[in-house]
């Protein structure tokens, strides 16, 4: 409607294919540099806001609630946590079906209000429950590159 | 207040591109696949189909009688559905142009090595209303001899190579 | 109509490449803005974010990604977008929030991290063109600006060497700006001798790509009077877009800017802009663009801006200083943040707090504008002390 | 608030999985033509326009460039909100209240069918450093959220399936909706698991379409329309965007956006004072989670209420009589626009077979989808 002339034949209809051809390199930032250098050592740090009583993992340079600067308040938080929620995912990020499913979870790091989104490994899916204690399994030290993938997965304790 | 050197000193940390590329600082790479198939619709669909035939088509507004190129199904100024289809010429005049030493990635062309600079222009198409132009390349002309108002004509790809695209016109070249 | 004032401002350094993430840049500017007027995040009712294409920072829906770092945590938070015009539109968007009576305070944050895009941020501009009728020709942003500059020059008979004076002036002004990325003492000859990018545009005619952020705090009158002795009022706002069929417009004159400026002047009660406005920050991503905008803002008659430039009218000591900050050509161009930087410059000038950049004569009225998209956006703010 | 603002014209194309015969320009042109016709105005009467778009969903790096022409907004005040349609509606309202003008136009458009790599585009919204390197489907985020919601509230997968059954059924009677179907709960529960407990049928399929709304200040509204629909309250809010720190069981953003809208509308008991609601149901559990966040249901109550038919068109509080996203399609930025459209149709008594009797106040709510925590709410009355 509204047009006085429309396609009358399906075979006349056409489209134009195209793409946005960009690529990216993201620096991990001030807090990220601190976090991933520790990850390479097999450790994890967070950032503490004393006034809000919140410990952020991954660490940030600011508290999102009160905007306090947290750069002088980094602290080691350990590599253990509990499963906050989890899923078994059968779909790849491009929307196709995965060859093998993965178990993805939000891990709440002990003593913090933050955590990591990561895989669960060395575990039977049926045995997983919300609140399950888990710990990070790191790649061998020489394979670590300062990335979230330096952690292979979390496994039950 | 006033914003001083001291205030801004620690707000951002300067890096060189090599510090990033050589891994002095940590980074993550990503190549998104952002692909589309945009529906042409009747106006652009016909425009492309006519280009394939070696013709340029426009739409005429039934109210203001502007002959509009590229064609559109409505006149955006009068806010009425557009009227009849009108073939326009494949000639026109140069409204404005550039002599570019860079491509779309900001990479410099090897001008000294003999590469011809790009000379894209806005070309007012003959037969369309005054001032109605399209973007296209100029060629077969000394880049430094292009002038405002220069008459130009489309150089088409051979019929069998045309696909129904703006690039079915290879470029425009000057005519007497 | 409720009066709305700018009461605080913050700005990061601008660099070609920064270590900071987009969030960290936004936080730094926002934090400085809050601190500058001794406000806490809890004093803020709502947040407006202005940031240009997602294709720079490389995050889809980057307004969402940046929300917490802009003070938007659990607040009414909204992003606005008019391409390059965003930096001056964001305060207008914030103005709606406060002038409407829905909120008393509003944080306006602009951020851009262009350096994430590879191989060059300029690549993101290929896909601003019509995907079907223009992109197959592989156009780039510089082309269309050079196309516009050429039309502007040939219509008025302007000379490149005169237009180059804009770069000389702005880079020099930027020497006094603490955030400046590429300030310097250069000559007209330096501009003309710099590499040709796309004639008539040489390298020194162009602002750089940059990372950076800027923020301001807006307040309704009753709050503004409480938090500061020197509120700067947003007395007029205007915004406008012209057609996306950019090849069908005569590019020699920015009609869209005149329409936006007339709205803003009408609201501010300005009848003779060139007399009533004491300082201007016209958007200057390219040298010619400052002049193009000075004409569109009706601060110079059409075809006369170059002569006024040559006569020194627009110098910091001149009758109508333009881009006293150093502009995008000198301070840098993290798109939306650069636009807001211009608003901040007028704010500081009208408060007499621009330091070494301060213009003389106690200015009380200033204007800033920004521009973008396919050379079709005009955004204008008129401010008074 | 000194002035009242009403919707005096709506126009839409309807919503279909694909719209191959028109470009995005013509799609919006159609909706705009209808909206202006209904309001009895021309673009020249409009004081300002607000469009919605997100660059990567349109396929342009600066998508707002292409906003003015098909709205008749050339050389007029117009800008773009990369947000939900209801965000843009709030902008229209704020501009009227600010004195920018009396007539505003708000536009939203979806050409979701034109995105060939939609899943990657949504994944591209995730944090590039902490989340994206895992290369997980965005649906994993929904799966995790659903799991936590079921855990915290005791809601069952069967109750979520009932949402799908209800909404797809409602869509059958909505001529604008394109994804209606008659199915039962087992069909949903047995459909392919995408990210457990989320199945293929829990996910709303996408759709194309456009909506244009004309807003006017009270005096103008009464002159233009016999049936103005008033904006009584509007709210929007963003919670933390971080996956690591957010509250996975609750939709805090919906709660706070609703509280803002309720306060403006003077609503204290939403369950009693709202006659029906169009709630974001991009995923089945989202409808239930949002109902609870907005105090239309108590925590854990939305599932059982749905199971007992309380949210059917004939129920105590009808929810998504239009068919929602599950029945009419996920329209991305336009989701809120389609919700507003349905509330307007209901309040004017123009909802056909899905008309709810004697309605005076309706609520439209939207959410910006994975991985955001941004929501919008608007309360409309006739």
Image (cartoon, helix red, strand yellow):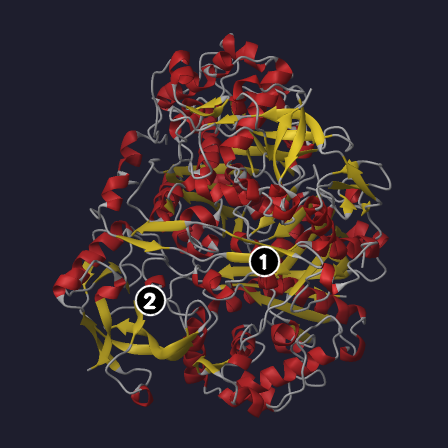
Vertical position of residue C329 compared to residue B25: above or below: above
Residue C223 visible (yes or no): no
At horizontal 39% and vertical 22% (from top left) the residue drawn is C195
Residue C111 picture quarter: top left
Which residue is label 1 attached to? B37
At mark 1, the secondary structure is strand
Quarter of the image for the N terminus of chain C: give it. Answer: top right
At mark 2, the secondary structure is helix
- Which chain is indicated by disc 1? B
Residue A62 visible (yes or no): yes
- Same chain under badges 2 and 1? The reply is no
Residue found farthest to the top? C311
Task: Report the side of C19 relative to C345 (left or right).
Answer: left
Along the viewing direction, whichever of A89 and D338 lies nearer the viewer: A89
Along the viewing direction, whichever of D222 and C87 lies nearer the viewer: C87
**10 Å crowding of disc 1: few (<14), some (14-19), many (20+):** some
Which residue is label 2 attached to? D134
Task: Report the side of C174 relative to D254 (left or right).
Answer: left
- Which chain is indicated by disc 2? D
Along the viewing direction, whichever of D125 and C148 lies nearer the viewer: C148
Gap in angstroms between the C-alphas marked 2 and 1: 28 Å
């Amino acid at each position: 409607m509204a047009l006085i002339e429309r396609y009358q034949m399906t075979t006349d209809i056409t489209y134009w294919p195209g793409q946005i051809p960009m690529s990216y390199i993201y620096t991990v930032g001030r807090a990220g540099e601190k976090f991933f250098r520790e990850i390479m050592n097999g450790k994890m740090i967070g950032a503490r806001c004393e006034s809000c009583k919140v410990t952020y993992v991954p660490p940030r340079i600011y508290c999102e609630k009160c905007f306090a600067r947290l750069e002088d308040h980094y602290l080691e938080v350990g590599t253990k946590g509990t499963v906050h929620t989890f899923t078994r995912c059968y779909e790849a990020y491009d929307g196709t079906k995965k060859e093998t499913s993965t178990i993805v979870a939000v891990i709440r790091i002990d003593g913090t209000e933050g955590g990591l989104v990561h895989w669960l490994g060395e575990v039977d899916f049926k045995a997983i429950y919300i609140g399950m204690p888990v710990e990070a399994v790191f790649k061998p030290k020489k394979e670590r590159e300062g990335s979230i993938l330096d952690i292979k997965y979390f496994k039950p304790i | 207040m006033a914003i001083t050197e001291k205030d801004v000193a620690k707000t951002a940390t300067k890096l060189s591109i090599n510090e990033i590329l050589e891994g002095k600082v940590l980074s993550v790479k990503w190549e998104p696949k952002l692909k589309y198939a945009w529906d042409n619709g009747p106006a652009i669909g016909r425009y492309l189909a006519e280009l394939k035939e070696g013709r340029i088509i426009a739409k005429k507004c039934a109210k203001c009688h502007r002959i509009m190129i590229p064609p559109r199904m409505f006149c955006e100024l009068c806010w009425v559905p557009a009227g009849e289809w009108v073939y326009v010429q494949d000639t026109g005049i140069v409204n404005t142009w550039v002599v570019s030493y860079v491509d779309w990635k900001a990479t410099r062309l090897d001008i000294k090595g003999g590469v011809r600079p790009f000379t894209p222009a806005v070309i007012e198409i003959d037969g369309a209303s005054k001032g109605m132009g399209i973007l296209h390349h100029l060629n077969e002309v000394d880049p430094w001899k292009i002038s405002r108002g220069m008459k130009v004509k489309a150089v088409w790809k051979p019929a069998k190579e045309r696909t129904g695209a703006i690039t079915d016109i290879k470029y425009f070249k000057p005519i007497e | 109509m409720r009066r709305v004032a700018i009461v605080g401002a913050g700005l990061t350094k601008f660099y070609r490449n920064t270590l900071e993430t987009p969030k960290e840049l936004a936080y730094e500017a926002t934090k400085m803005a809050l601190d500058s007027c001794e406000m806490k995040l809890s004093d803020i009712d709502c947040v407006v974010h202005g940031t240009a294409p997602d294709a720079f920072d490389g995050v889809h829906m980057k307004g969402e990604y940046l929300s917490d770092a802009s003070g938007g945590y659990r607040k009414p938070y909204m992003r606005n977008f008019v391409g390059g015009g965003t930096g001056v539109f964001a305060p207008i968007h914030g103005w709606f929030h406060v002038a409407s009576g829905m909120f008393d305070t509003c944080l306006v944050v602009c951020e851009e991290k262009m350096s994430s895009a590879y191989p060059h941020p300029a690549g993101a501009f290929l896909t601003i063109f019509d995907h079907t009728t223009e992109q197959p020709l592989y156009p780039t942003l510089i082309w269309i600006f050079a196309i516009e500059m050429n039309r502007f020059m040939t219509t008025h008979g302007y000379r490149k060497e005169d237009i180059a004076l804009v770069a000389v002036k702005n880079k020099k002004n930027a020497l006094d700006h603490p955030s400046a990325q590429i300030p310097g003492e250069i000559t007209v000859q330096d501009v003309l001798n710099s590499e040709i990018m796309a004639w008539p545009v040489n390298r020194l005619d162009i602002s750089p790509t940059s990372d950076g952020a800027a923020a301001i705090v807006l307040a309704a009158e009753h709050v503004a009077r409480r938090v500061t002795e020197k509120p700067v009022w947003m007395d007029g706002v205007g915004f406008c877009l012209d057609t996306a069929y950019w090849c069908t417009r005569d590019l020699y004159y920015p009609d869209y800017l005149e329409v936006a400026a007339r709205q803003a002047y009408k609201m501010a009660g300005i009848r003779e802009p060139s007399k009533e406005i004491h300082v201007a920050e016209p958007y200057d991503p390219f040298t010619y663009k400052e002049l193009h905008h000075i004409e569109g803002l009706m601060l110079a008659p059409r075809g006369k801006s170059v002569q006024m430039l040559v006569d020194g009218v627009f110098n910091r000591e001149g009758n109508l200083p333009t881009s006293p900050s150093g502009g995008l050509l000198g301070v840098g161009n993290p798109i939306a943040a650069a636009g807001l930087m211009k608003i901040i410059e007028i704010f500081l000038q009208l408060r007499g707090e621009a330091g070494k950049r301060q213009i003389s004569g106690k200015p009380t009225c200033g204007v800033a504008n920004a521009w973008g998209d396919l050379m079709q956006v005009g955004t204008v703010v008129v401010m008074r002390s | 608030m000194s002035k009242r603002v009403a919707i005096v014209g709506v126009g839409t194309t309807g919503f279909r999985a694909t719209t191959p015969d028109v470009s995005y320009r013509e799609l919006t042109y159609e909706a705009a033509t209808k909206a202006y016709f209904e309001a009895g105005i021309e673009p020249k009467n409009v004081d300002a326009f607000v469009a919605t778009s997100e660059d990567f969903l349109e396929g342009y790096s600066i998508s707002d460039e292409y906003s003015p022409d098909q709205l008749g907004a050339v050389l007029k005040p117009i800008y773009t909100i990369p947000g939900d349609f209801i965000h843009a509606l709030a902008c229209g309202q704020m501009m009227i209240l600010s004195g920018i003008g009396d007539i505003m136009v708000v536009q939203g458009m979806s050409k979701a069918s034109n995105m060939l790599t939609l899943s990657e585009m949504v994944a591209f919204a995730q944090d590039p450093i902490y989340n994206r390197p895992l290369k997980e489907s965005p649906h994993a985020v929904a799966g995790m959220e659903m799991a936590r919601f079921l855990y915290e509230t005791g809601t069952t997968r069967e109750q979520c399936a009932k949402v799908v059954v209800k909404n797809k059924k409602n869509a059958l009677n909505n001529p604008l909706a394109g994804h209606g179907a008659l199915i039962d709960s087992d069909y949903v529960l047995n459909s392919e698991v995408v990210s457990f407990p989320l199945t293929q049928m829990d996910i709303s399929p996408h759709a194309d379409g456009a909506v244009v709304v004309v807003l006017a200040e009270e005096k103008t509204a009464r002159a233009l329309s016999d049936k103005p629909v008033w904006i009584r309250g509007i709210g929007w809010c963003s919670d933390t965007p971080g996956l690591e720190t957010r509250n996975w069981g609750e939709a805090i953003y919906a709660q706070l956006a609703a509280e803002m809208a309720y306060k403006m509308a003077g609503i204290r008991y939403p369950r009693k004072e709202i006659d029906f609601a169009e709630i974001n149901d991009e995923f089945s559990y989202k409808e239930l989670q949002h109902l609870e966040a907005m105090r239309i249901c108590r925590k854990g109550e939305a599932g059982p209420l749905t199971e007992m038919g309380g949210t059917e068109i004939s129920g105590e509080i009808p929810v998504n009589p239009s068919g929602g996203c599950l029945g009419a399609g996920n329209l991305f930025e336009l989701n809120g626009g389609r919700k507003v459209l349905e509330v307007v149709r209901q309040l004017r008594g123009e909802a056909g077979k899905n008309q709810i009797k004697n309605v005076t106040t309706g609520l439209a709510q939207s959410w910006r989808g994975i991985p955001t925590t941004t929501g919008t709410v608007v309360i409309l009355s006739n």
